[in-house]
């Protein structure tokens, strides 16, 4: 049985499983009023892929199978499709600024051009205890 969304005249929203043959109205569990169906969110069975991001594309001659024309043609088609998608949806574009540091402290979050430098906590110096005086 499918799951439907309903809304009563008082504004209460609820979900209820009902057969397809059941009427379009159900009683509200809060106030008991007859409630009508409202448009539900949809669920797609498949999964869309935006393709490879710029960072995931081959960056070296070896990565392109030494310039294999067939592989380069596939990459070019993927890149053109990705570029069109990024033009249409800005959120897929990602950060285009160059990476300045990516190792050590910046392994989890690379430092990019324009980022402020993170404050490095300064450890207080350990107190120095005087050495015992030499006895003659």
Image (spheres, rainbow, N blue to C red):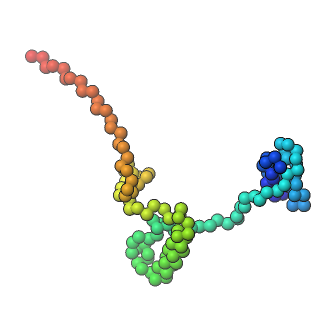
Q: Which residue: 44% across, 51% down?
A: 108
**Left or right of 48 in this view: 24:** right
Considering depth in this image, is 126 or 112 the residue closer to the camera? 112
Question: Residue 131, percent across and down?
Answer: 19, 23
Identify whether 87 is placed above or below 17. below
Question: Residue 44, percent across and down?
Answer: 70, 64
**Left or right of 16 in this view: 95:** left
What is the quadrant of the C terminus in the image?
Answer: top left
Identify whether 62 is placed above or below 13. below
Identify whether 31 is placed above or below 96. above
Q: Which residue: 67% across, 66% down?
A: 46
Is residue 3 in view from this perspective?
Answer: no
- Of all residues, the one furthest to the left in this rendering is 136
Is residue 117 in view from this perspective?
Answer: yes
Considering depth in this image, is 34 or 75 the residue closer to the camera? 34
Q: Which residue: 72% across, 61% down?
A: 42
Q: Which residue: 52% across, 70% down?
A: 87
What is the quadrant of the N terminus in the image?
Answer: bottom right
Indicate the quadrant where residue 37 lies.
Answer: bottom right
- Of all residues, the one furthest to the front in this rendering is 9
Question: Residue 16, percent across and down?
Answer: 82, 51
**Left or right of 14 in this view: 102:** left
């Amino acid at each position: 049985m499918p799951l439907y969304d309903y809304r009563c005249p008082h504004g209460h929203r609820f979900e209820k499983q009902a057969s397809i043959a059941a009427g379009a109205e159900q009683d509200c569990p809060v106030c008991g009023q007859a409630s009508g169906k409202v448009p539900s969110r949809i669920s797609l069975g498949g999964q869309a892929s935006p393709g490879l991001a710029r960072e995931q594309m081959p960056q070296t001659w070896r990565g392109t199978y030494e310039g294999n024309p067939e592989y380069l043609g596939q990459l070019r088609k993927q890149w053109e499709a990705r570029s069109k998608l990024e033009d249409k949806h800005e959120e897929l574009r990602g950060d285009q600024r160059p990476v300045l540091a990516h190792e050590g402290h910046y392994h989890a979050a690379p430092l990019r051009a324009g980022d402020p430098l993170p404050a490095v906590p300064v450890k207080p110096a350990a107190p120095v205890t005087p050495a015992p005086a030499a006895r003659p």
